[in-house]
Amino acid sequence: MRKTIFLTMWNLSIKPSGMNRSVFKQAKQFLKHGYQPVILTMDFSFDYPQITRELKAFGFIPDAVPVLNVYDYYAEKFNEKSMSAAQKAYYENSITKFEEGYWVEDDGDTARYFVNGVYTKYKRWDKNGQLMIVDEFDDNRVRTSRREFHPDGYLARETLYHPANNKRNQERYFTHSGFCYLTIWYNNETDRQQSVFLFDPSYSKAMVFPSMKQLQTAWIDELVNLEAVKPIIIAEQPSTVERVSNLEHDNASRIYMRHTSHVESFEPLVMEKDAAILLQVMPKGYPIVVTTEAQRRHLEQTIGDRENVFVMPDYFESTEPDVVRDMKKFVSVSSYDAGHATSELIDAFKLVVDKDPEAKLALYGKLTKQRKEAMNKQIAKLKLKDAVTVHGYQLNIDEVLAGAVANVIVSESDGQSSSIGEAFANGTPVIAYNVAFGAAEAITDGENGLLVDAHNVEALSESMIDMLDEEKAKKMGAAAKQQAEARYTAELYSKNWLALLDHIEAYTPKAPLI
Amino acid sequence: MAKTVILKNVTKTYSMYESKSEQLTDLLLPFKKKKGRKFDAIEGITFSVEEGDIVGLVGINGSGKSTLSNIIGGLTPASSGEVIVEGEVSVIAIKSGLSNNLTGKENIEFKCLLMGYSKEKIEEVMPAIIEFSELGDFINQPVKQYSSGMKAKLGFAISVTADPDVIVIDEALSVGDQTFTDKSLAKMMEYKKRGKTIFFVSHNTKQVENFCTKIAWIEGGHLREFGPTNTVMKNYRAFIRKYNKLSETEQKAFRDSLAAGRKHD
């Protein structure tokens, strides 16, 4: 009998972030060492079965690790055997483009429906011809409802809009058989949830929750109660920290993980808003896991040291891709959120190209459309179109990193940066802003990379020019690889974790009597 | 910043006897089964404190605050676990080890001698101590004639003169009058600025909140919470409110269940 470890996350996507991947690696090691990891997700998506299939096919999540979602769980649990006849007929009718009794404006993947000149309905299909949504309108062309269909062909969610401002007012969620298992009421002015009702077909009393947050907590509690052996829950993300901390019973051991930095600014000291609940849980003595020593020390000083903060650096293994390293090519692999000064990097690279016209920079990572446009605009303005390219998300990042002279990271704050670890595993040195906690801890300036004062564009360009010295870059790359092999290995990682997991009871505080 | 006080898994166990004869039997017959029952005043307490931290020890009566402060102050040894205190430590308590038969002045001399001061040095610091203690003429009277507030004043005055690195104040400020308390708090603030570590035991939650940077909340001999003042005091106040709402029998049941966990053979 394996002990279950619930890894609680907000969502999953087929473009997993560094944090997502770090959770998958966790699952892999826990499974290998005799535990049964189960990934829990909290958001609503039609695609979880497909996302899970793909992540498993790519080898991110081991086959033996189930992925459960709160909506899918109840949709499945409260599903009656087969699709009802009414549900089937409704879908058949909906899927047809030229419905009887309507004049249809056909626009390929979308269509508008008119009755005697009045616009009443809108439909959209996906690329494969699957019906996705049906919107209905009142006589004033104000949308009154939206029905969303599951790829398997049934109505999954219906949203009703308030006539006053066309904001959502109510959502209903349906099982495969057409039973409404969940209703959410919204305040149409604030978009806040007012009440959430859960319906069980075999029980005529509706369960009510103030919002989805409490239902998600109740769901975790329900799963915990099904376990024969006291399970462990790891809250991986700020959003799930709150849900896990709200669990009242003491029938699961809890671990709270912080993958990113908990500090927004050091002078004056301001903590990240989304770390607030974690910082309230920490004094109670629950195990807190961070990824850098410096972060632990900072937490001990500012919150209090009762030996409940553990450091578990992530491990990084290269797939050893067969690529030739281009000693003139820099890459920057990051998630490009607000905490990344990418425009400074592009400015700095202008100075590099002025010095060495053959130098290239390739930017990789998840990008919003606006952000990509802004970057391309800046690149065009600086006449860097030949030197700087923007690539978006790359699934196999090893190829990118192993083919570059250095990985440049202009993040303003971080935990252990996966981009640094991945670069080191591929023998690629890193140039980074000298910021707490990740970069400053992983990089020894001049040895396995270069540290630059944050926001110093000139120094950043000088570091890149410095790195164009081939011999220097190769030496640093070798040192980087060595560090990865010494410090970021799966063996060390699982040893660290097992020391906590195998003795979790000793690290779990007693539940208070009052 | 460095850690100044480190407690690792500290436990203090007392033996409890029903009569003197039981105690004697245990002492005189070491190989016989012990008659006394054991009581854990504190159990498995682990936390560390940094330079410049002012740590409030809070908890309801009998939770183990004073035992803990005495262990930190080196007045009682821990039964097990490790206590590391960097630098000189001084304890200020209501009964702060003053000799009742000696006068105030003699007590100052006596305590200063214990701290290793020379005769000259004692003469040098004496006026400052008397001045701070606000005792005036009473300084030449035996301490047994002092009120508890006066004892606390004298104890406090002697202890702060020693300029210790770690100071433990056990309820000492709750017996003095407001002006003396304010003066003492000002002195503590000065110490805080100089990076000293202070432990502060008090039932006065207002004082604790104004003065402390971190709070260690002790419940039934265990460390329930340890963290920043605002976080822990919020929870502690909520607990006190709930506790006060309980009926007397429920309160007793709560205390009994805590105590039951601390008694063993």
Image (spheres, coloured by chain):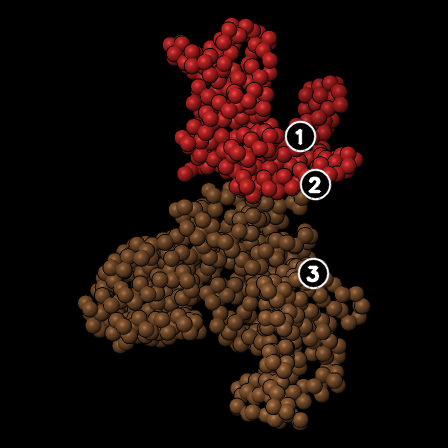
Asked if A135 appears above or below A245 in the picture, the reply is below
In three-dimensional space, the C-alpha distance between marks 1 and 3, rounded to whole angstroms, equals 40 Å
Q: Nearer the viewer, residue B116 or B62?
A: B62
Q: Colour of chain A?
A: brown
Q: Which residue is mark 3?
A: A209
Q: Chain of mark 1?
A: B
Are there few (<14), some (14-19), or many (20+) residues within 10 Å of tag 2?
A: few
Three-letter amino acid code at the position of disc 2: Lys
Q: Is residue B114 visible?
A: no
In three-dimensional space, the C-alpha distance between marks 1 and 2, rounded to whole angstroms, equals 18 Å
Which residue corresponds to the image point at 63% horizontal and 91% vertical from the top-left? Answer: A116
Query: Do tags 2 and 3 sit on the same chain?
Result: no
Which residue corresponds to the image point at 31% horizontal and 61% vertical from the top-left? Answer: A431
Left or right: A60, with A134 as reference point: left
For the C terminus of chain A, give its image quadrant: top right
Three-letter amino acid code at the position of disc 1: Gly
Asked if A453 appears above or below A23 in the picture, the reply is above
Asked if B185 appears above or below B259 in the picture, the reply is above
**Which chain is drawn using red?**
B
For the N terminus of chain A, give its image quadrant: bottom right
Q: Quadrant of residue A165?
A: bottom right
Residue A321 placed where, x, y %?
38, 74
Q: Which residue is mark 2?
A: B242
Which residue corresponds to the image point at 51% horizontal and 24% vertical from the top-left? Answer: B182
Q: Nearer the viewer, mark 1 or mark 3?
A: 3
Are there few (<14), some (14-19), or many (20+) residues within 10 Å of tag 3?
A: some
Q: Are marks 1 and 3 in contact (CB under 8 Å)?
A: no
Q: Chain of mark 3?
A: A
